[in-house]
Image (cartoon, grey):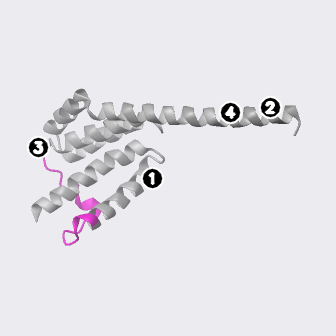
Amino acid sequence: MKKNTKILIGIVVGGGLLSCVACVLLMSAGFFSAFDAANDPAVQEEGKKVGQAGSPRDCERAALDKARACGQIDFACQTKVQMFASTCLYSTTQEAPGFCERMGLDPNEDMMQQSFKAGMWSAAECKKIMPNNQACTNALNASVNYCVQELSRRR
């Protein structure tokens, strides 16, 4: 093998390894950033305030508004949206007739079946209103979890 060919192979392989290392480091930074975001007291406090002043529907709308600001791979933003939505939903003081019923949950199904059905609902909704936005899915999954727990509590 010629010397130039060996050098070229070394550059390509070395560049590929460096790219892999860079990707791992970036993904790790995103993970730790998302972990910090999940423990952000300001996000939880804001969710609590919105929830105490409104209904589950108000929480979901506010969470979807926040989701629109998230980038496609902005794990911290996506995590904040889910934390906001969850805190908000569990702090609500007002009823929202039909909020959970729109998901098509059946009280006779077990929690796993309800979660699966509601997860399919949230994916379909996000595909309509905010395609390719994981933060939308996170926001609606918070609503799904809330409704599955509400339904099991009513039994």
Image disc number at residue 93: 3
Question: Where is residue 137 drawn, in percent x and y?
Answer: 38, 48
In the image, is residue 31 part of the stretch drawn in magenta? no
* Label 4: few (<14), some (14–19) or many (≥20) C-alpha neighbours in 10 Å: few
Verify CB contact (< 8 Å) between mark 2 and mark 4. Answer: no
* Label 2: few (<14), some (14–19) or many (≥20) C-alpha neighbours in 10 Å: few
Q: Residue at 27% across / 39% down in the picture?
A: 83
Badge 2 marks a residue whose secondary structure is helix
Instruction: Give the Cα separation between the discs numbered 4 and 3.
Output: 58 Å
Instruction: Let me know if residue 98 appears in the view.
Output: no
Q: Which of marks 4 and 1 is in front?
A: 4
* Label 3: few (<14), some (14–19) or many (≥20) C-alpha neighbours in 10 Å: few
Residue bearing mark 4: 14
113 over 46 or under it: above or below:
below
Badge 4 marks a residue whose secondary structure is helix
Image disc number at residue 127: 1
Verify CB contact (< 8 Å) between mark 1 and mark 3. Answer: no
Sequence-wise, which precedes: disc 2 or disc 4? 2
Image disc number at residue 7: 2
Sequence-wise, which precedes: disc 1 or disc 3? 3
